[in-house]
Image (tube, rainbow, N blue to C red):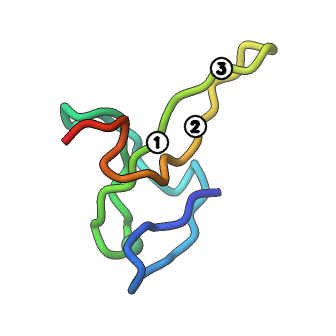
Amino acid sequence: MFTCRNQSCGADWKLSDVNIHNEGQGLLFRCPMCGARNYVTRRRTKDGETTYAQVTEFPPNGKR
Ligand SMILES: [Zn+2]
């Protein structure tokens, strides 16, 4: 479950609700409700499944 980081939105989304892609500064999805960028990191479980974790720090990865 992801939560839109736009505080006036705050919508919750499942992985299947969002389109995760890279706009050049790392993986992110655009909130389907407000369009805010929400950064995520890709993780791989030991079963070989790909999962995503939301990045809550800003700017992500210490980059601008
Ligand atoms: Zn939003």
| Residue 51 in the image: above or below residue 54 | above
Per the image, label 3 sits on a secondary structure element best described as strand
Residue drawn at point x = 63 percent, y = 25 percent: 50
Per the image, label 1 sits on a secondary structure element best described as strand
Using the image, tell me which numbered label, if any, was put on residue 9: none
Q: Earlier in the sequence, mark 2 or mark 3?
A: 3
Question: Would you say the beta carbon of the disc 2 residue lies within 8 angstroms of ligand 1?
Answer: no
Question: Would you say the beta carbon of the disc 1 residue lies within 8 angstroms of ligand 1?
Answer: no
Q: Amino acid at mark 3?
A: Arg
Check whether the beta carbons of the residues at disc 2 and disc 1 lie within 8 A of each other: yes
Q: Is residue 53 left or right of residue 36?
A: right
Quote the CA–CA distance across marks 2 and 1: 6 Å
Residue at the farthest front position: 62
Residue holding disc 2: 52
Q: For label 3, count other residues whose C-alpha is less than 10 Å away and answer few (under 14), some (14-19) or many (20+).
A: few
Q: For label 1, count other residues whose C-alpha is less than 10 Å away and answer few (under 14), some (14-19) or many (20+).
A: many
Q: Nearer the viewer, residue 4 or 20?
A: 4
Q: Earlier in the sequence, mark 2 or mark 1?
A: 1
Image position, residue 55 (x, y; %): 48, 47
Image position, residue 31 (x, y; %): 38, 64
Residue holding disc 1: 40
Using the image, tell me which numbered label, if any, was put on residue 44: 3
Residue drawn at point x = 65 percent, y = 57 percent: 1
Q: Amino acid at mark 1?
A: Val
Quote the CA–CA distance across marks 2 and 3: 8 Å
Q: For label 2, count other residues whose C-alpha is less than 10 Å away and answer few (under 14), some (14-19) or many (20+).
A: some
